[in-house]
Amino acid sequence: MAKLFRLFGKKRGGRMSGWWVVGSVSEAAFYGLLFILGIVSLTTVVTWRVFWPASSILEIGFGFWLMVIASSSFVLIGLTAFLLQVSHVMASPELRSAMVDQAKRDHHRRSKGEADTAATSLPDATILKDSPGVKLAYRLAANQGDTATLAVSAAFGAAWNAMLAVLIVICVENHLVGNHQYFLTVLLVPFAAVSYFATRWFFRLFRRHIGVGPTTLEISELPLLPGNKYALYLCQYGRVTFEKLKVSLACFEETTYQQGTDVRTERHEMSRNVVIGPKQFVIEPEKPLELDCQFTLPLDTMHSFQSPHNAIVWKVIVEGEAPRWRTFCRSFPIVVHPRPVYPQPAQQRDDVNLT
Amino acid sequence: MLEFEYVVNHVEPQSVEKLEVSVMWYTEGKGSEDIGIHMFQQVGREALIAISLDQPRRLSCSLPASPLSFEGRLLRIRWCVRLRLFLADGRELTTDKPFYLGHLTRDL
């Protein structure tokens, strides 16, 4: 129980003591509150001058501008640190670093005016090769869909709370000067309820995300070829007891089509091969779960395919069931190439011939 | 390597504006159709008059390693040789000869 209140960790060799979940949530809450405080004070100062210019309180001068600058800095610092804290949970430092490097390379290529590689029906595997692994050759990047909900909840929560803070300030100011706006006051109740549920939604997702901890997956080779044997390394951080933890290799058909004015995407799971588990595991923050395994891709496997409206997608899926954090599922896209059945000619695609 | 020949019968060379031969893959199924052209040859009016259409014309091309022919629930990938005739009166005649690339499906 005492660990719940241990907000400050201590580095002990290669690990940190304390429960970093509480620390991360508290840090996010602190910067969120700083942002709200900045919004409230900035709105108070500015609206007072706008609506009651004759008032002697908060007259334009040194004190007024000091308040504006201080409040603005609260807003900027609070929002930036809050979003950074959220982004730290959504992507590991290695992934963020790889994304920055990729952005730099893309910018460099665009600035040089180099054309992209020729269009092909095989997805590009070079993006997956950007991040080298610690034990194996490549570290796989998790699907961004897992963190999209967290990003949406953070953006919605921040925007809604900021709006509520502005409305509260206006309402209180009106009451103080005797201009009782009861409609606005009543309106604040459902707005506050939405704010409560939005904040609770965010912190539940945030706690769940950092509670299970990041998942690192490394693979010996990319792209994969049918019939070959590959090594896989899984490292799961966090403090959690998994009733079931399973790693599988899955293949999906994805297709996009128009239904009336809507564009719909449908997905069908073609195959799933269990690589690890399901087994029970207990993970401690001081000792992350590390699993090594090998698997062979079946010979009759369809390769990855990508066209504008259709795709065949391969993923390594890590699924777990933990009583405290409920189920979780993280997917890591990989690319499977077809096995060459005969020596390939140097020219893959015949030239278009017009006579 | 794919080798094939085509013959156009019962059509006067003067009535053909142009002719196109393609080796291509296309998708079928629930989603919108995508195509990929591997080889494309267009024969214009002058060249058509010079040759005899009812004589077999042999073509060949080396096939790529992907995409392989595939039969899925939502998506099918098919390969074919497509011949398209553009007639002088504005009509188009198209015929496909499907073939199978790879070892994943047996049913065409």
Image (cartoon, grey):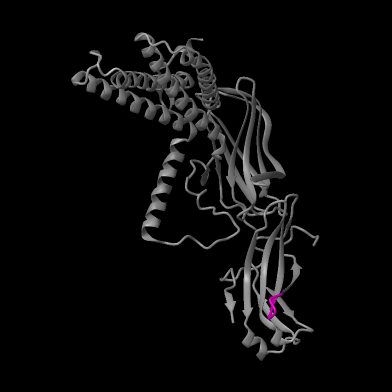
Quadrant in which residue A338 is drawn? bottom right
Residue A215 is left or right of residue B35, and the answer is: left
Residue A248 is left or right of residue A213, and the answer is: right
Residue B106 is left or right of residue A58, and the answer is: right
Total labels: the figure holds 0
Quadrant in which residue B1 is drawn? bottom right
- Residue furthest to the left: A62
Where is A86 relative to A29, above or below? below
Query: Which residue is more in the foreground, A296 or A79?
Result: A79
Rendering coords of residue A104 (x, y %): 38, 49
Q: Which residues are magenta?
A: B85-91
Q: Residue at x 56, y 71 (%)?
A: A346
Quadrant in which residue A84 is drawn? top left
Rendering coords of residue A152 (x, y %): 51, 32
Query: Which residue is more in the foreground, A43 or A280?
Result: A43
Q: Residue at x 71, y 87 (%)?
A: B13
Residue B74 is inside the magenta segment = no
Q: Residue at x 31, y 26 (%)?
A: A72
- Specify whether residue A126 is in view: yes
